[in-house]
């Protein structure tokens, strides 16, 4: 959320000055992930994993390259709704 009224307070029904704030632009980064596949049956697998990515976002206050982390869980269904017998 961006405060387009800069430091003024919002007053309902009153004419107020708002300012157009331009943010954004191209950022860059890279990521890597690792995971393990648990094959529970021919049709089902459970894949937990970990991802780390370094990114540079073109927003005020976020101009340094910093890491972010995430954990993911993937459920894979193969030939679940059809069979090729």
Image (cartoon, grey):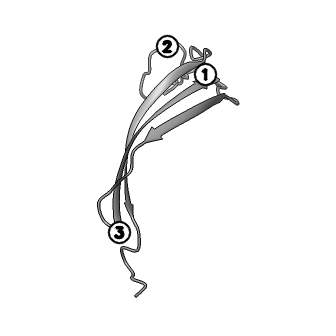
Q: Toward the viewer: 11 or 47?
A: 47
Residue found at x 67% / y 28%: 27
- Residue assigned mark 3: 43
- Residue assigned mark 2: 8
Quick one: label 1 or label 2, which is nearer the N terminus? 2
- Residue sitting at the far right: 26
* Element marked by disc 2: loop
Residue 33 in picture, x, y percent from top left: 50, 37
Residue 13 in picture, x, y percent from top left: 44, 29
Compared to residue 61, the image places residue 81 above or below, namely below
Residue 85 in picture, x, y percent from top left: 40, 88
- Residue assigned mark 1: 59
Tell me which corner region of the image, top left, top right, bottom left or bottom right, holds residue 30. top right
**Cβ atoms at labels 3 and 1 below 8 Å apart:** no
Quick one: label 2 or label 3, which is nearer the N terminus? 2
Residue 18 in picture, x, y percent from top left: 59, 23
Tell me which corner region of the image, top left, top right, bottom left or bottom right, holds residue 20. top right
Residue found at x 51% / y 22%: 67
Q: CA distance from mark 1 to mark 2?
A: 22 Å
Of circles 3 and 1, which is in front? Answer: 3
Residue found at x 39% / y 82%: 83
Q: Toward the viewer: 60 or 6?
A: 60
């Amino acid at each position: 959320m961006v405060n387009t009224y800069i430091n003024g307070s919002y007053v309902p029904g009153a004419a107020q000055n708002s300012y157009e704030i331009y943010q954004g632009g191209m950022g860059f980064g890279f990521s890597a992930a690792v995971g393990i596949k648990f094959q529970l049956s021919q049709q089902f697998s459970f894949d937990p994993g970990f991802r780390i990515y370094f990114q540079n976002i073109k927003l005020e206050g976020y101009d340094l390259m910093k890491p972010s982390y995430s954990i993911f869980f993937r459920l894979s269904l193969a030939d679940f709704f059809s069979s090729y017998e």
